Image (tube, rainbow, N blue to C red):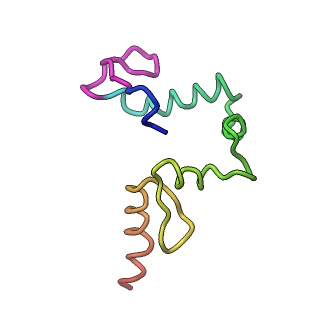
Amino acid sequence: MSENLPRLIPTGTCWCGCGSSVGLGSFFSRGHDKVAEAALLAVRYESSVARLLDHHGFGPDKSVLETAVDEGGWKECPYCEYAGAPASIRNHLNRYHRAKESS
């Protein structure tokens, strides 16, 4: 999917719209990605993640988690049902499963 999207270029100004200068290669000031995310949810989806998911065709009958694994580069934990970005899976394994193996 991402190969069809245009490449985004940081501009030196925070993309949340606050006008702050940001470091080289950054889109946001620290924490402002979450501010922008919340503002977008408010503007387009009545501050509801459920409305966001529904708008994109996800919900109880179509899992956004399964789709992220199938199409979005996410991975599943080999020991449980946890799914996340590869770095999250590594942290999850270290925190929950490898700790149990050494006990």
Above-or-below relation of 60 to 94: above
Residue 18 drawn in magenta: yes
User: In which image quadrant can residue 94 be found?
Assistant: bottom left
Who is closer to the viewer here, 91 or 72? 72
* Left or right of residue 91: residue 62: right
Q: How many marks?
A: 0
Residue at 62% across, 29% down: 41
The segment highlighted magenta reads: 8-25
> Residue 65 vs residue 97: left or right?
right
Residue shown at 32% from the left, 18% from the top: 11
Image: 25 above or below 75: above
What percent of the width, then of the height, locates residue 77? 48, 67
Q: For this view, does 73 lie left or right of residue 37?
A: left
Image quarter of the C terminus: bottom left
- The picture places residue 60, in percent across and down from the top left corner, at 74, 52
Q: Position of residue 28 (x, y in %)?
A: 38, 27
Frontmost residue, 66 versus 94:
66
